[in-house]
Amino acid sequence: MRHENSYKENMKKSAMDRKRKEDAFMLDIFSQMVIDEALFKAKKEEMKAQIDCALDNHDEEKFYSLSKQYKELLKKYA
């Protein structure tokens, strides 16, 4: 009887450990997604501000360069 309980306990522990690892893995993925989204939004806003500045300064070359980079950023994350 003792051996049977031990086996059941080991199986239960193994299943719980597996579930815990899966949960930790999913939490890591979710955390990375949140970080990536925050970085994307910050970069997007920074680039918008730089584009606005180029427009205000009538810097056509900088405007086109930044606009191209902005489009590439949107393609990468869209």
Image (spheres, grey):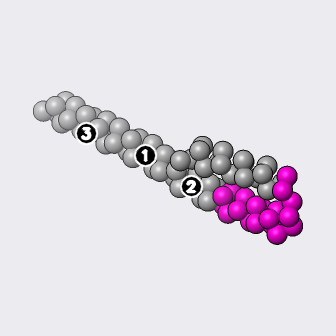
Disc nearer the start of the sequence (3/1): 3
Which residue type does callout 3 highlight? Lys
Give the labeled residue for mark 1.
26
Is residue 9 in the magenta section?
no
- How many numbered discs? 3
Disc nearer the start of the sequence (2/3): 3
Which residue type does callout 1 highlight? Met
Q: In the displayed structure, would residue 66 be above or below residue 76? A: below
Q: In the displayed structure, would residue 16 be above or below residue 42? A: above
Which residue type does callout 2 highlight? Glu
> Could you say where residue 7 lies in the image, as x and y percent from the top left?
22, 31
Report the magenta stretch's main SS.
helix
Residue at the (66%, 58%) spot, across then down: 44
Q: Residue at the left extreme?
A: 1
Q: Nearer the viewer, residue 70 or 40?
A: 70
Binning the other alpha carbons within 10 Å of mark 3 as few (below 14), some (14 to 19) or many (20 upward) gives: few
Contact, mark 2 vs mark 1 (Cβ under 8 Å) = no
Q: Secondary structure at mark 2?
A: helix
- Residue 24 visible, this angle: no
Give the labeled residue for mark 2.
37
Q: Nearer the viewer, residue 78 or 64?
A: 64
Q: In the displayed structure, would residue 76 be above or below residue 60? A: above
In-image side of 23 versus 9 (left or right): right
Q: Secondary structure at mark 3?
A: helix
> Could you say where residue 73 lies in the image, as x and y percent from the top left?
65, 48
Residue range highlighted in magenta: 42-61
In-image side of 27 versus 8 (left or right): right
Contact, mark 3 vs mark 1 (Cβ under 8 Å) = no
